[in-house]
Image (cartoon, helix red, strand yellow):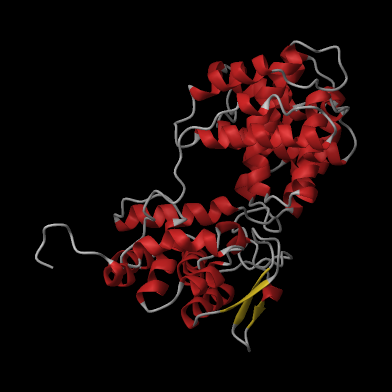
Amino acid sequence: MDAFAASIHPVPAAWLSNSSLAPFVPDYWRCLIERRYSAATTRSYLHGVAHFARWIHRWRRLAVCDLAEADVQRFLDDHLPRCTCPSPVQRCRHQVRAGLRILLEMLDDLGVLANPSLVPNAIDSELCRLNEHMQHARGLAENTRTQRLRILRPFFEQIHEANQARPTLPLPTAADLRRFIDLQLDRWNPNSARVLAGTLRSYLRFRAVCGDQVGHLLPVITSPAHWRLAPLPQTLSRAEVTKLLDAFSPELPSRLRGYAMVRCLVDLGLRTREVVSLGLDDIDWQAGTLRIVKNKSRRVDVLPMPRTTGKAIANYLRSERPHTANRRVFVRHVAPLDKPIGPDVARNAVREAYLRSGLPYTRVHILRNTLASRLLDTGGSLQEVADVLRHRELDTSLIYAKVDTARLSAVALPWPGSAA
């Protein structure tokens, strides 16, 4: 305890030393140091853990092995809002939650936690089986799988309530499906309700693969009206693209990283997951190419790297990227530095740039639409659009024919009654 006690106030240090967490605090402190957290963040997290330690010592009387995520959530929701603990005490919910998340991860790695949630129940087992089927048999992307599992969990919970004694989930009935759809439609808009219908059909097809008779249930799931390729793709004008790229002023934190990621989206039409998954070994500087490995089509693609994109990435690597063992191109700028960033970092970089430049947009996919429109404006074909955007089928690129005004004007018929 002496190694870090000097860095925090004596009061929270005493809370830690008098709690059941005392034997694990040195390991927790070393964990923060190894992850390269700053001294201020380390002190803040230790104060948060001390606050939690006092709570479980005085009111909960929990053993360390019995700690779980639910206890942390109860501390955050019940104790923090009405906390009367003496100062100094860490009451910032964000800081406490982040520090306690690392604590639970460390205790789990040490094998201390006897977490009953690790024992799979009927719902978790079914979700696991379905996820493996979607990944290995159908080749669905991670985002699609995550979305479907999130939709199906409350459906499984509804079925499980009436069949808690069974070790596996029974086949849903038509009444189960109708009740779940009625409840969910109150939360979904008509345009998005087709995702709900598609998810339920996907699950029934999985049960059919498992040998269950589900043919009579499929007509129960009706889709809302949705005409494919009906909307017009939203794109940015050249002036708006320029305003977006000019929205990274020198005083911004992580400016070069954000600018380089937006360049990848604008110049190459990459998806956000593809941008954050770029590795240092995926760039061939001599040939001027980028290798896209973790993409939606689950294949390896090699794209030419425009000079503007290469320059933006090189400036980031030379001037802003921190020293880290992470082999990704774009990495975290705050501890833990060795952990990869997620797609939300790229999405937030675009959305914040929209806001700074005064553009009324929020969607990142607009940049892929813009690249497709730019290719068509300069004489490219739909096949070239499909190749650059890496669509598996040309049919996916047909929607961009609606923004090819030059070719549309050549085949447009005169308006009835006009002079033309």
* Residue sitting at x 61%, y 37%: 198
The picture places residue 10, in percent across and down from the top left corner, at 68, 32
* Residue sitting at x 67%, y 68%: 323
* Left-right relation of 420 to 280: left
Disc tally is: 0
* Left-right relation of 5 to 150: right
Rendered view: 383 above or below 130: below
The picture places residue 395, in percent across and down from the top left corner, at 53, 60
Location of residue 90 by image quarter? top right
* Residue sitting at x 43%, y 77%: 380
For this rendering, which residue is in front, 149 or 417?
417
Rendered view: 43 above or below 74: below
For this rendering, which residue is in front, 380 or 61?
380
The picture places residue 146, in percent across and down from the top left corner, at 66, 41
- Furthest toward the left, the residue is 419
- Quadrant for the C terminus in the image: bottom left
- Furthest toward the front, the residue is 417
Rendered view: 169 above or below 403: above
- Quadrant for the N terminus in the image: top right
Residue 345 visible here: yes
Residue 150 visible here: no
Location of residue 190 by image quarter? top left
The picture places residue 235, in percent across and down from the top left corner, at 36, 60
* Residue sitting at x 59%, y 68%: 321
